[in-house]
């Protein structure tokens, strides 16, 4: 049975400007269930990042409300973690220190087992004493993901986390994240411009309209499962994938 984690109710956000108020998103209603991987697609400037910032508690709502586990979101909270396109790793700290930064700052009990778990998951145990500048962009992003996950957030928010990577590293990180989510069963809300990325990572894909953005359609998909279960599977050759991709593309062009 699905267990609701996040409830977004009639949410709108407007920004004040010299020519008056501009509505960024309008009448957003959605739910995120525990262990969902929800990916949001939409045209540039439609309000995708605004909605992610609403969920993170970084911006104030003009209308509506957002709840996590039944509690009203009024600002940032430790139950939510954010992975940005730019990793924002601390250059003066090595990889181990970057990953442990949050728990160490909060003076949590010994997290050695948790740290060992994540440094092994991201495959960088041999690099834990290196500094960020010594790692590739893809490796840095794996560190950023581990740094978020070690805090055990209820919801991980991802703002185009692979957008700054080259095609090869992007594909490698997509494979990594897909397998990690399947194993760890954490909950993700991610925004991207890449339809293929959305369809092959998420189990739910939401499509937003042009600004002011609102959610116009949802697709429940399982292409990620086909990729995980079949080494020979090629999504672009799957008629259902092609059909779904075309439907989303048509929506984005409206």
Image (cartoon, rainbow, N blue to C red):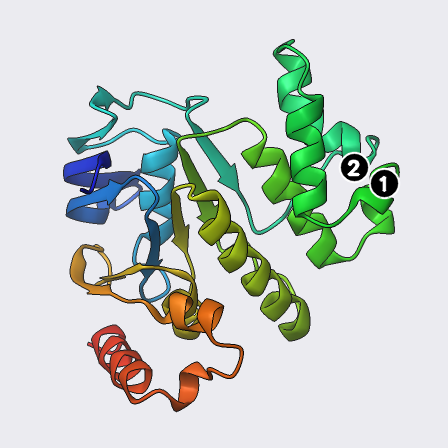
- For the N terminus, the image quarter is top left
Task: Give the residue number, with chain letter if any, for mark 1.
Answer: 131
Q: Nearer the viewer, residue 217 or 60?
A: 217
Q: In terms of sequence position, does the residue under pointer 2 or pointer 1 come before the other?
A: 2
What residue is at 22 percent from the left and 66 percent from the top? 219
How far, Cα to Cα, is label 2 from label 1?
6 Å
| Mark drawn on residue 96 | none
Above or below, 56 against 238 in this view is: above
- In the structure shown, which secondary structural element does the residue marked by tag 2 occupy? helix
Q: Is residue 13 above or below residue 165?
A: above
Determine which quarter of the picture holds residue 111: top right
**Residue 46, horizontal then vertical, whole percent:** 30, 58
21 versus 250 height, above or below: above
What residue sits right under mark 2 in the picture? Answer: 95
**Viewed as shown, does residue 58 lie left or right of 72?**
right
Q: Quadrant of the C terminus?
A: bottom left
Q: Residue sitting at 28 percent across and 24 percent down?
A: 73
Nearest the eye: 23 or 2? 2
Label 2, residues with CA under 10 Å away: few <14, some 14-19, many ≥20: many
Proximity of marks 2 and 1: CB atoms separated by less than 8 Å? yes
**Residue at 41% in and 52% down:** 190
């Amino acid at each position: 049975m699905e267990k609701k984690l996040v409830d977004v109710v009639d949410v709108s956000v407007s920004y004040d400007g010299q020519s008056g108020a501009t509505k960024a998103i309008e009448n957003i209603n959605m739910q995120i269930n525990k262990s969902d991987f929800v990916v949001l697609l939409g045209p540039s400037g439609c309000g995708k990042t605004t909605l992610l910032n609403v969920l993170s508690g970084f911006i104030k709502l003009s209308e509506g409300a957002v709840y996590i586990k039944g509690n009203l979101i009024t600002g940032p909270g430790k139950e939510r973690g954010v992975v940005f396109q730019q990793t924002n790793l601390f250059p003066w700290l090595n990889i181990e220190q970057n990953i442990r930064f949050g728990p160490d700052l909060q003076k949590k009990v010994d997290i050695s087992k948790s740290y060992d778990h994540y440094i092994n998951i991201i495959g960088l145990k041999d690099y834990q004493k290196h500094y960020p500048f010594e790692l590739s962009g893809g490796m840095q992003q794996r560190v950023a993901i581990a740094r978020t996950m070690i805090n055990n957030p209820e919801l991980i928010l991802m703002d185009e986390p692979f957008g700054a990577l080259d095609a090869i590293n992007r594909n490698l990180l997509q494979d990594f994240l897909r397998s990690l989510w399947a194993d760890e069963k954490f909950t993700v809300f991610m925004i991207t411009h890449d339809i293929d990325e959305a369809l092959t990572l998420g189990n739910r894909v939401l499509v937003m309209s042009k600004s002011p953005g609102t959610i116009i359609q949802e697709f429940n998909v399982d292409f990620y499962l086909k990729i995980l279960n079949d080494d020979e599977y090629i999504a672009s050759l799957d008629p259902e994938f092609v059909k779904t991709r075309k439907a989303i593309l048509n929506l984005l062009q409206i």
